[in-house]
Image (cartoon, rainbow, N blue to C red):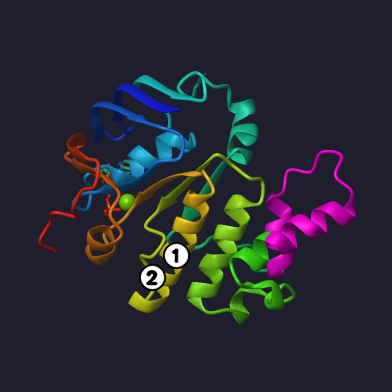
Amino acid sequence: MIEMQDVYKTYPNGVMALSGINVRIKQGEFVYVVGPSGAGKSTFIKMMYREEKPTSGSIMINGVNLAKLKDSKVPLLRRHIGVVFQDFKLLPKLTVYENVAFALEVIEESPKNIKKRVMEVLDLVGLKHKARFYPDELSGGEQQRVSIARSIVNSPKIVIADEPTGNLDPDTSWGIMDLFEEINNRGTTIVMATHNREIVNTIKKRVIAIENGKIVRDEARGEYGYDS
Ligand SMILES: Nc1ncnc2c1ncn2[C@@H]1O[C@H](COP(=O)(O)OP(=O)(O)OP(=O)(O)O)[C@@H](O)[C@H]1O
Ligand SMILES: [Mg+2]
């Protein structure tokens, strides 16, 4: 369902961040993307939600080539792919409830159904009782749970996360991983860039290692494999 063919990415400053990437990720897979700093993990991930376009090559997601997707179609794509960031990216002036509702694709939905769906995902992440709180009234782990709720509110088939536990302490990180596993168990594909060796080596999943813009390893139940 996600397929990259011969993907190259050179940034305008001349840095070649990805070269010759070929990968296929099936619906329902859970994939870690690992590798040294500057290897190209975030660039790889950004290709999948069209934050960046490849310089050449194709990225097919459910039959759509993101390399050729019109800019005007990008918002529609984003509603079908949940994205979670290291720094949460919540809107500070909106409540928890509003942050999640804001992301909801509202097509002929009654206010009652919208509320039902938002509260459903807040319940899943364990934050129903904080629906009226503002982001700065929450801990880092709680903020990340809100951003996960936001990422799944439209029931996307894919959730992409770039170092979602990067700003969190170990205990909180395990809680966040439980959530991702729960979402994956419901059939959602997860692609997650991470530097968290312990998580990768404990919750065994497919591991794609990127170094110098190339995939150097791709294992079904892989290890983190770096010393630091
Ligand atoms: N917008 C940009 N413009 C120019 N160069 C960039 C840009 N974004 C990333 N790069 C460069 O592309 C390369 C890959 O960067 P990328 O952010 O994908 O690495 P990464 O593996 O995610 O690293 P980290 O683990 O530190 O997050 C690096 O050399 C980086 O400096
Ligand atoms: Mg990165």
Please name the amino acid that badge 1 sits on: Asp
Q: Position of residue 175 (x, y in %)?
A: 44, 71
Q: Does 95 appear in magenta?
A: yes
**x%, y% of residue 187?**
51, 43
**At 54% from the left edge and 22% from the top edge, which residue is drawn?**
69
For disc 1, the neighbor class at 10 Å (few under 14, some 14 to 19, many from 20) is: some
Verify whether residue 19 appears in magenta.
Answer: no
Quarter assignment of residue 67: top left
Q: Which residue is mark 2?
A: 174
To which residue does mark 1 refer?
178
Q: Which residue: 68% across, 50% down?
A: 103
* Span colored in magenta: 94-120
Q: Secondary structure at mark 2?
A: helix
Q: Is the C terminus in the top left, top right, bottom left or bottom right quadrant?
A: bottom left
- Residue 136, percent across and down? 60, 77
Kindly identify the residue that appears in the image at 72 percent across and 49 percent down: 104
The structure residue drawn at horizontal position 72% and vertical position 54%, both measured from the top left corner, is: 102
Q: Residues within 10 Å of mark 2 (few under 14, many from 20)?
A: some
How many labels, in total?
2
Q: Quadrant of residue 157?
A: top right
- For the residues bearing labels 1 and 2, Cβ distance under 8 angstroms: yes
Q: Tell me the quarter of the picture where residue 137 sits.
A: bottom right
Chief SS of the magenta region: helix
